[in-house]
């Protein structure tokens, strides 16, 4: 089974989540010799060949209700081939009560319907890495909405279990 994890990360949390996912998949999937897991950050990626992958896991972080434009654009431009693959959609989001709304807003309806699983990996507000504008926005939003400022490792582990069952 060949798995491709596509992501975009602004301040590093999503990249950390995808690296954790990749390591867990490599450690836990059965028949490890036949496994290939590759991650690609779509920020700066020129061409991504989806043809040789059985599974495509794609997502990014949510800021002010939106996923990175690279993720949205990639899904739109590659929708037809994505619909021929086993798909998992994910996001790194600190407002789990808005999870469904954010999946709806940020991924094409046909891709959401086709996806075998959607996962919220949680997130961390890494304000020490943010610029002035993002710090102010997250501070204002945090006052209005309670946030879960943590990576949801349990959800990532459940995704690995799901993939393990699918590879059997």
Image: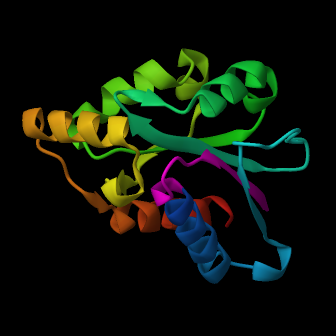
Coordinates of residue 31 in the picture (x, y in percent): 75, 79
Q: Confirm whether residue 124 shows in the render.
A: no
Residue at 78 percent across and 25 percent down: it is 78
The quadrant of the image that shows the C terminus is bottom right
| x then y, percent, for residue 123 | 35, 54
- What colour-coding does the image apply? rainbow
Q: In the rendered image of this protein, does residue 162 appear above or below residue 78?
A: below
Q: Nearer the viewer, residue 109 or 140?
A: 140
Given residues 45 and 39, the one toward you in this image is: 45
Name the image quarter holding residue 152. bottom left
Q: Is residue 94 left or right of residue 107?
A: left
The magenta stretch spans which residues? 1-14
Residue 2 appears left or right of 116: right
At horizontal 26% and vertical 32% (from top left) the residue drawn is 98
User: Looking at the rendering, in which quadrant would you find the N terminus?
Assistant: bottom right
How many numbered marks does the figure carry? 0
């Amino acid at each position: 089974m060949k798995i491709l994890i596509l992501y975009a990360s602004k301040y590093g949390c999503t990249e950390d989540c995808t690296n954790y996912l990749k390591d867990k998949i490599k450690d836990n999937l059965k028949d490890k010799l036949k496994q290939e897991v590759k991650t690609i950050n779509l920020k700066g990626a020129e061409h991504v060949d989806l043809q040789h992958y059985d599974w495509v896991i794609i997502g990014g972080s949510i800021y002010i209700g939106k996923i990175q434009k690279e993720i949205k654009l990639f899904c739109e431009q590659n929708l037809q081939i994505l619909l021929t693959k086993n798909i998992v959609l994910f996001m790194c989001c600190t407002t789990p009560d808005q999870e469904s709304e954010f999946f709806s807003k940020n991924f094409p309806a046909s891709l959401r319907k086709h996806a075998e699983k959607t996962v919220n990996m949680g997130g961390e507000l890494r304000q020490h890495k943010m610029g002035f504008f993002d710090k102010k926005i997250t501070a204002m939003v945090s006052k209005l909405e309670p946030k879960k400022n943590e990576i949801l490792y349990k959800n990532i582990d459940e995704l690995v279990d799901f993939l393990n069952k699918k590879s059997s």
